[in-house]
Amino acid sequence: MSLEMRTVCERCGTALAYDGPAFICSYECTFCASCASDMDHVCPNCGGELVARPRRRTDETPLKPSNHYEEVYPTLPARHTET
Ligand SMILES: [Zn+2]
Ligand SMILES: [Zn+2]
């Protein structure tokens, strides 16, 4: 099985959004922020440290390249083909 993102807090059952705050231990026990805080960020199941779960973007659209790129790397002037 690939990595599964759980959508509810194991302790209180609060729904956890993919892009919302959540805390996981190294065994992927998943808790909401308030439960993690209540438990001093220690997993009650395995005793591991609870860390903030990386947020998953809900859309797959890559970020637009910023204009800054063109400022740093200006495109070369087009060559004039003279006949
Ligand atoms: Zn909770
Ligand atoms: Zn755990």
Image: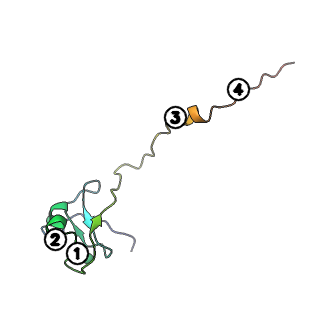
* x and y percentages locating residue 7 in the rendered image: 24, 63
Label for residue 77? 4
Q: Are marks 4 and 1 in contact (CB under 8 Å)?
A: no
- Dot 2, crowdedness within 10 Å: few (<14), some or many (≥20)? few
Question: Could you tell me how far apart the alpha carbons at marks 3 and 1 are, in whole angstroms?
Answer: 43 Å
Q: Are marks 2 and 4 in contact (CB under 8 Å)?
A: no
Drawn side of residue 3 relative to residue 49, left or right: right
Drawn side of residue 2 relative to residue 15, left or right: right
Q: Amino acid at mark 2?
A: Met
- Dot 3, crowdedness within 10 Å: few (<14), some or many (≥20)? few
- Dot 4, crowdedness within 10 Å: few (<14), some or many (≥20)? few
Question: Could you tell me how far apart the alpha carbons at marks 2 and 1 are, in whole angstroms?
Answer: 7 Å
Q: Are marks 2 and 1 in contact (CB under 8 Å)?
A: yes
Q: Is residue 6 visible?
A: no
Q: Please give the name of the residue rendered at 35% of the width and 52% of the height, measured from the top-left corner.
A: 57
Question: Could you tell me how far apart the alpha carbons at marks 2 and 4 are, in whole angstroms?
Answer: 61 Å
Say whether mark 1 is within 8 Å of ligand 2.
Answer: yes
* x and y percentages locating residue 12 in the rendered image: 12, 67
Q: Secondary structure at mark 3?
A: helix
Label for residue 43? 1
Task: Single out the mark in the foreground, 3 or 4.
Answer: 3
Question: Could you tell me how far apart the alpha carbons at marks 3 and 2 are, in whole angstroms?
Answer: 44 Å
Indicate which quadrant contains ligand 2: bottom left
Q: Which quadrant does the C terminus fall into?
A: top right
Label for residue 68? 3
Q: Please give the name of the residue rendered at 70% of the width and 26% of the height, measured from the top-left corner.
A: 77
Q: Secondary structure at mark 2?
A: loop
